Image (cartoon, helix red, strand yellow):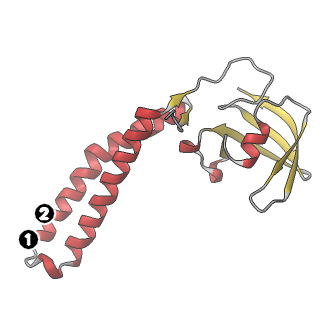
Amino acid sequence: MGSDYILTPEGREKLEQELHYLETEKRAEVGERIKVAREFGDISENSEYDDAKNEQGMVEARIAEINQILSEATIVDTPKKSNKVTVGAIVTVNMGGKERVFTIVGGAEADVAAGKISNESPVGAALLGHKKDEEVTAIGPTGREIKMTILKIEH
């Protein structure tokens, strides 16, 4: 099976930093919480212990997830000069009279609130391969058509 993860070099760096934090600081912090909670006595009715163990499970699951993403990811370097939308490009579009700016990234680093949309999302997939001044139509999750005009592409 091929890699389903696409990362920009910046996305890989961000995941590596998160992994380092989780493996060093967060793991030790949660371990200390478990140790302190055990000292309260009977762990069968100890909510502090249960909370710490739940957090430990979430931290370990995230560490495993990041390791899997990093081991399977395809790192894409954005071309320095391209007149087409590619993964890693910053695209300014006119969407219904409003100017919107998106950075096209792989699904593992998508963050809509930060303007980073996945290359697999309806808008991201529709924009890929298109040039400045082209009109692009995407079909949203509800089936609604989203019309955009590409105003600017930066790499």
Q: Provide residue 153's location: percent of width, then percent of height.
A: 79, 30
Q: Nearer the viewer, residue 9 or 61?
A: 61
Could you tell whether 32 is left or right of 14 in the image? left
* Number of numbered labels in the structure image: 2
Q: Measuring 75% from the left and 28% from the top, which residue is drawn there?
A: 154
Q: Measuring 74% from the left and 58% from the top, which residue is drawn there?
A: 141
Which disc, if any, is residue 35? Answer: 2
Q: Measuring 51% from the left and 33% from the top, which residue is drawn there?
A: 2
Q: Which residue is mark 1?
A: 39
Could you tell whether 74 is left or right of 24 in the image? right
Which disc, if any, is residue 76? Answer: none
128 shown above or below 113: above
Q: Provide residue 83's location: percent of width, then percent of height.
A: 81, 22
**Label 2 secondary element:** helix
Q: Nearer the viewer, residue 48 or 127?
A: 127
Q: Residue furthest front?
A: 1
Alpha carbon distance from label 2 to label 1: 7 Å
Residue 148 location, quadrant: top right
Q: Residue furthest top?
A: 81
Q: Nearer the viewer, residue 136 or 37?
A: 136
Mark 2: few/some/many CA within 10 Å (<14, 14-19, 20+): few
Q: Quadrant of the C terminus?
A: top right
Indicate the amino acid at tag 1.
Answer: Glu
Q: Provide residue 147's location: percent of width, then percent of height.
A: 89, 49
Indicate the amino acid at tag 2.
Answer: Lys
Could you tell whether 122 is left or right of 107 in the image? right
